[in-house]
Image (cartoon, grey):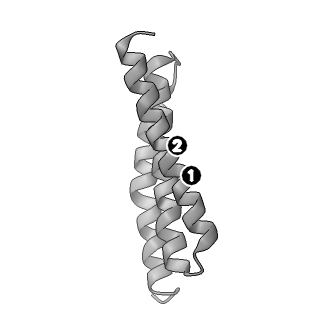
């Protein structure tokens, strides 16, 4: 293992621990706002884990997926979060 792979592995482990902590918070929490915010955390963590994985594994569409996820992660969660905070009111 070269030093770059060690750094990627340690980043992946830290992100995995964050993901598991988020899942535990979703399961323990009864508040729907906490669950909504934590679900965004899980989504962003999965995107970051994919990007870390794609740095070491060559795929033909790695960066296209990252750009699509960035677009989707920027627009859709903001709209859905605003709807959840306002409880469906417009």
Does residue 46 appear in the picture of this structure? no
Q: Residue at x 49, y 74 (%)?
A: 34
Q: Residue at x 49, y 64 (%)?
A: 38
Q: Quadrant of the C terminus?
A: bottom left
The one nearer the camera, 66 or 4, is 4
Report x, y in % for residue 40: 48, 60
- Cα separation, mark 1 vs mark 2, equals 6 Å
Q: Are dots 1 and 2 in contact, CB under 8 Å?
A: yes
Q: Residues within 10 Å of mark 1 (few under 14, many from 20)?
A: few
Report x, y in % for residue 49: 49, 37
The image shows a total of numbered marks equal to 2
- Residue of label 2: 16
Report x, y in % for residue 47: 48, 42
Label annotation for residue 31? none
Residue pushed farthest top?
A: 2
Residue pushed farthest right?
A: 27
The one nearer the camera, 79 or 81, is 81
Q: Residue at x 35, y 14 (%)?
A: 3
Report x, y in % for residue 35: 54, 71
The quadrant in which residue 81 appears is bottom left
Does residue 23 appear in the picture of this structure? yes
Label annotation for residue 20? 1
Element type where label 1 sits in the image: helix
Q: Residues within 10 Å of mark 2 (few under 14, many from 20)?
A: some
Q: Residue at x 64, y 68 (%)?
A: 27
Residue 16 vs 10, above or below: the answer is below
């Amino acid at each position: 293992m070269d030093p770059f792979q060690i750094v990627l592995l340690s980043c992946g482990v830290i992100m995995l621990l964050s993901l598991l902590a988020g899942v535990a918070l979703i399961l323990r929490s009864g508040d729907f706002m906490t669950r909504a915010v934590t679900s965004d955390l899980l989504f962003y963590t999965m995107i970051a884990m994919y990007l870390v994985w794609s740095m070491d594994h060559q795929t033909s569409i790695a960066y296209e997926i990252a750009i699509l996820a960035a677009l989707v992660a920027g627009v859709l969660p903001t709209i859905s979060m605003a709807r959840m905070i306002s409880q469906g009111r417009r």
